[in-house]
Structure formats: structure tokens, C-alpha cells
Image: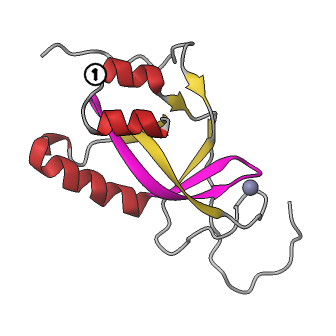
């Protein structure tokens, strides 16, 4: 197997859409958007996950979605067991590796990819990478002096 060194520069050809937040909090469901406080909707997105060193994983996942921010929120604790369950049989040495949720694909491309009809390079051509990845820190609920909203 030849090793491909991954360069961080993004190819210009990649299409972009949506923003993304990987929710690391077990007890925070984000029923409201952490950015604009709109009530989030529940929608399925075919997510594309890149696992080190070079494994693509497609996951049609129910996520929280804020339509006004175009923000997808996926729970870390829900994604990781699904990845582990998939690769523990086929490719156990990558379980636990670093990974990045890099974007989404169209439903029809997800279906083809899921049936292994697409080569990895064909798949990459169909990925929409996220326009932006956001991070939010959650302050535990409790009694705090009112400092006003930023
Ligand atoms: Zn929002």
C-alpha cells in the first residue's frame, strides 16, 4: 500500500454547503440553536467522515438543524459507536483513530456510496465540504449573575 501524505490545503474544486458543529456534550441536546436560539429541527444528513489515515465513512445520520444558520449539529457520542461498530469487523485497526466530519453528500450519492458503487475518488468529487465548522461552549445551567447577552 502506498502512503498518501495528506496536505492540509483544500482543493479548490470542492463544493461547499452547510455549517457544522460536532456536539461533544452528552447531556446537551441543542433543541435550540446555540448561535441564534431558533428552535432546531431534526433532519437526516448523509455525513461524510474522514478517518485517519485514509478511510471515508458515510453515515446517514439524524442531526439537529438550524435553518436560519444553516447549521448541522451532530452528537459525538452517537457517531463514534456507529463508526466503531462498522469498522470493528472490516478494519479494526482504525477504530479509535482521529477523524473529521468533513461534509455531506446528496442522498442519491450516499445510496450509491453505501452500496460501494463509487470509488473513493468518485466519492470525493461528490462531497460538499462544510462552509464552516463552529464550536460552542456550554455553560452548565445554574444561578449566575446576569451579565447580559453578548
Ligand atoms: Zn441558528
Relative to residue 67, is residue 74 drawn left or right? left
Please give the name of the residue rendered at 13% of the width and 41% of the height, measured from the top-left corner: 91
User: Counting other residues with Cα less than 10 Å from the Cα at mark 1, is it few (<14), some (14-19), or many (20 or more)?
Assistant: few
**Nearest the eye: 131 or 110:** 110
> From where the camera sits, is residue 51 visible?
no
| Highlighted magenta segment, given as a residue range | 52-75
The picture places residue 114, in percent across and down from the top left corner, at: 30, 39
Quadrant in which the C terminus is drawn: bottom right
Ligand 1's quadrant: bottom right
The answer to whether 129 is drawn above or below residue 98 in the figure is: above
Q: Nearer the viewer, residue 44 or 37?
A: 44
For the N terminus, the quadrant is top left
Q: Residue at x 36, y 19 (%)?
A: 122
* Residue 82 in view of the camera: yes
Q: Which residue is mark 1?
A: 119
Which color scheme is applied?
Answer: secondary structure
Amino acid at each position: 500500500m502506498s502512503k498518501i501524505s495528506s496536505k492540509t490545503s483544500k482543493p479548490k474544486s470542492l463544493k461547499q454547503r452547510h455549517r457544522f458543529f460536532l456536539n461533544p456534550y452528552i447531556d446537551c441536546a441543542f433543541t435550540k440553536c446555540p448561535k441564534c436560539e431558533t428552535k432546531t429541527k431534526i433532519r437526516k444528513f448523509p455525513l461524510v467522515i474522514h478517518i485517519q489515515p485514509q478511510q471515508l465513512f458515510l453515515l446517514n445520520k439524524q442531526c439537529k438543524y438550524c435553518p436560519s444558520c444553516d447549521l448541522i449539529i451532530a452528537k459525538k457520542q452517537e457517531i463514534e459507536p456507529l463508526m466503531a461498530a462498522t469498522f470493528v469487523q472490516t478494519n479494526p485497526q482504525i477504530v479509535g483513530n482521529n477523524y473529521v466530519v468533513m461534509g455531506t453528500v446528496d442522498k442519491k450519492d450516499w445510496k450509491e456510496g453505501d452500496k460501494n458503487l463509487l470509488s473513493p475518488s468518485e466519492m470525493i468529487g461528490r462531497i460538499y465540504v462544510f462552509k464552516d465548522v463552529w464550536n460552542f461552549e456550554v455553560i452548565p445551567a445554574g444561578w449566575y449573575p446576569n451579565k447580559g447577552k453578548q
